[in-house]
Every structure is written in C-alpha cells, then in structure tokens.
Amino acid sequence: MADLFDVSGKIACVTGASSGLGRAAAVLLAERGARVVGVARRADTLDEIAAATNGEMATVAADLLNRDTLADTASRVAYPFGAPDILINAAGLNTREPADAVTPEGWDATLNLNLSAPFFMAQALVPAMREKGWGRIVNFASLQSRRAFQNGISYGASKGGVEQMTRAMAEAWSAHGINANAVAPGFFRTELTGPVFENSELADRLAAQTCIGRNGVPQDLDGPMLFLCSAASDYVTGQVLFVDGGFTAK
C-alpha cells in the first residue's frame, strides 16, 4: 500500500514555496524523496528552507505576478533536476478589500497570481509530462471557491476560477496521463491568513464552525497532498478536495 503514495524520484515544482502551505508541500515532498524546485519571490527565504530540508530541494526566485516572465520561469524550474512530473500551484494573494474599494490594480494582481499563473505554468510544463505519459497538477482552491466571505470579492472570483480551471485542465490533459486536481484548505494559520488569526475571537468562531472543532495545521495537508501527487490518485482527476475539518459540511 505504501507504494501507492510513493513520490520518491519524482520531480516537483512548488510555487509559493517560501511560506505557508506552499512551503509545507515543498518540504513534505522533498523529505519523501521527490526532487523539489521551490518557486517564490524571496530568494533568501527559499535558500534557508532548502538548506534546512532533509531532502533534495532547489530554488528559483521569480515574480509570478509578471505574466510575461512565466514561460521563462517554467523553463528555469527544469534546470536543476529536469522537467517536473508534479506541479503544485500554491502561490496566492488575498488583498481583503471591500467590494467598493477594489482597484483595477488589486483585481489584476489577484487574478494574475491566483488564476493566470497556475494556468500558464501548467501549460508550459504539460508538454514534458505528456511525453512521459504521467503528470500531476495540484491547484490551490479555497473555501471561497464556493462561499462568499466578507472583503473577498477579488479573491473569491479568482478561486472560483481555479475550481473550474481544474476541471478544464483535467478535460484537456488527463487522457495523456496528466491528472489535475485541487485542494481547498479551510482556515490554516499562515502568512496569508495572518489577519484572521490576529483576532482570537474570530479564530475561535471559525474553529467552532468546523465539524472537527479546530482550525487546520499544515500537517493536515500532508496526506491529501501525497495522495494527489502519487499513483494513489491514478483514477482521480478534475476534483476539488476540501481539507477544512468539515467547515463546508455545516
């Protein structure tokens, strides 16, 4: 059974690898034997993580907000170990603006990082996966893919798009052995959710909203991530897995 979840020897590209759930995914895969390329803007932070990781991890410093450089970034991630078998699109942005205060610049930045970057990174890496006849794309959706939250109109729009994009990726590429799925985390304490957890009353209220009775910790994603990145998910594609402690069940 352990072989089903084995990622050793696979090459993985993880965006947003300098913090939060992207960092957790990069470290997990490296420590499970994958050769990982972490992508983020902060080169120094990436290097610190790679140095402390018990596994093979290389880094690529890149600004995924700049759509014009995405093709170059995708080519650079193949330098350390070869073309990736696995792409995890974890980089994200949430401006937390009221609908009346959203600016064109904030809207474009949110959609570019949360929706455009995952697609164009995947588009650039898919040809090599197709040649191998095997690949995994794991996008990061959200509770806001399906629920409206206060001050989340641009973020919610982007994450709703991620859910549909994931299904469309599956339709386009799964016949070539490339499965595309998404995880939708609940409330995890990360840099992105920092403003939520600064309010202890709000954090407690969100924990109470789950069926399990607590908010998430990064290790809660380890099992789902290994499942979606390995042979265990050979017949699973186009799906969104909510890892939210039952938040959306209530």
Image: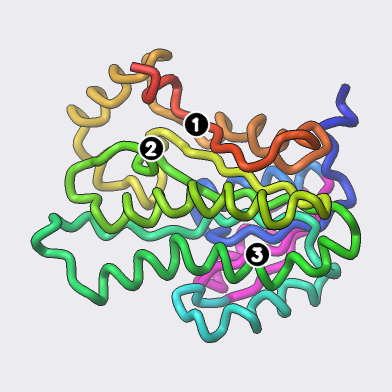
Q: Answer left or right for 59 relative to 232.
A: left
Q: Three-letter amino acid code at disc 1?
A: Phe
Residues at marks 1 and 2 touching, judged by CB atoms closer than 8 Å: yes
Residues at marks 3 and 1 touching, judged by CB atoms closer than 8 Å: no
Q: Answer left or right for 171 relative to 10.
A: left
For mark 2, what is the residue?
143
Asked if the stretch drawn in magenta spans residue 225, the answer is: no
Q: Quadrant of the C terminus?
A: top left
Asked if the stretch drawn in magenta spans residue 51, the answer is: yes
Sequence-first disc among 3 and 1: 3
- Across and down, in percent, residue 235 comes to 77, 34
- Across and down, in percent, residue 57 comes to 74, 60
For mark 3, what is the residue?
122
Residue 200 occupies quadrant: top left
Q: Three-letter amino acid code at disc 2?
A: Leu
**Residue at figure coordinates x 29%, y 20% from the top left:** 209
For disc 1, the neighbor class at 10 Å (few under 14, some 14 to 19, many from 20) is some
- Residue 188 against residue 62 in the figure, above or below: above
Label 1 to label 2, Cα distance in Å?
8 Å
Sequence-first disc among 3 and 2: 3
- Residue 203 against residue 65 in the figure, above or below: above
Label 3 to label 1, Cα distance in Å?
22 Å
Which residue occupies the foreground of this view, 149 or 7?
149
For mark 1, what is the residue?
242
Segment colored magenta: 33-61
Find numbered disc 2 in the image and state the secondary structure of the residue it sits on: helix
- Residue 190 against residue 46 in the figure, above or below: above
**Residue at figure coordinates x 90%, y 60% from the top left:** 132
